[in-house]
Amino acid sequence: MSDARQAIWSAEANGAARRSPDTLQAARILLQKAQARLETGAYEDARRYAVDARDEAIKARENAVRDAAVRSGFP
């Protein structure tokens, strides 16, 4: 879950809240599900949700970076 948290922080730092809010929100929801599963002892489910959260956060960051580059005139 640490990787997922770090990926979400990175996405936020790169402007995903403005430039890719739906994907960032999906990552946050998946992380919440991972935490809930961890608390109930469903470790494999928690791991899967955490990996999915990380992947969504990476997408959000990539979308935000790409959008920022397009808006600033970089190809």
Image (spheres, grey):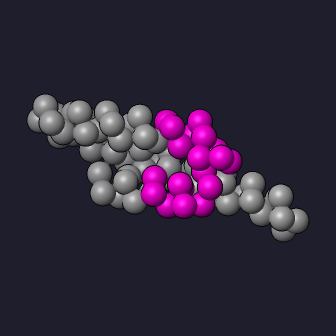
Whether residue 43 is visible = yes
Task: Reply yes or no: does residue 6 show up in magenta.
Answer: no
Q: Residue at horizontal 60%, vertical 50%? A: 16
- Of residues 22 and 47, the one nearer the viewer is 22
Q: Quadrant of residue 3?
A: bottom left
In the rendered structure, the answer to whether residue 51 lies left or right of residue 8 reads left
Residue at the limit of the structure toward the left, as seen here: 41
Task: Reply yes or no: does residue 16 show up in magenta.
Answer: yes
The magenta segment is: 8-26
Q: Is residue 49 above or below residue 5?
A: above
Q: Residue at horizontal 37%, vertical 54%? A: 5
Q: Residue at horizontal 25%, vertical 39%? A: 35
Q: Residue at horizontal 53%, vertical 43%? A: 24
Place of residue 34 in the rendered image (x, y in percent of width and height, measured from the top left) = 29, 38
Place of residue 60 in the rendered image (x, y in percent of width and height, measured from the top left) = 58, 49
Whether residue 52 is visible = no
Residue at the limit of the structure toward the bottom, as seen here: 74
Residue at the limit of the structure toward the right, as seen here: 73
Q: Is residue 39 above or below residue 68?
A: above
Q: How many numbered discs?
A: 0
- Prevailing secondary structure of the magenta residues: helix
In the rendered structure, the answer to whether residue 51 lies left or right of residue 59 reads left
Place of residue 65 in the rendered image (x, y in percent of width and height, measured from the top left) = 67, 60
In the rendered structure, the answer to whether residue 32 lies left or right of residue 58 reads left
Q: Quadrant of the C terminus?
A: bottom right
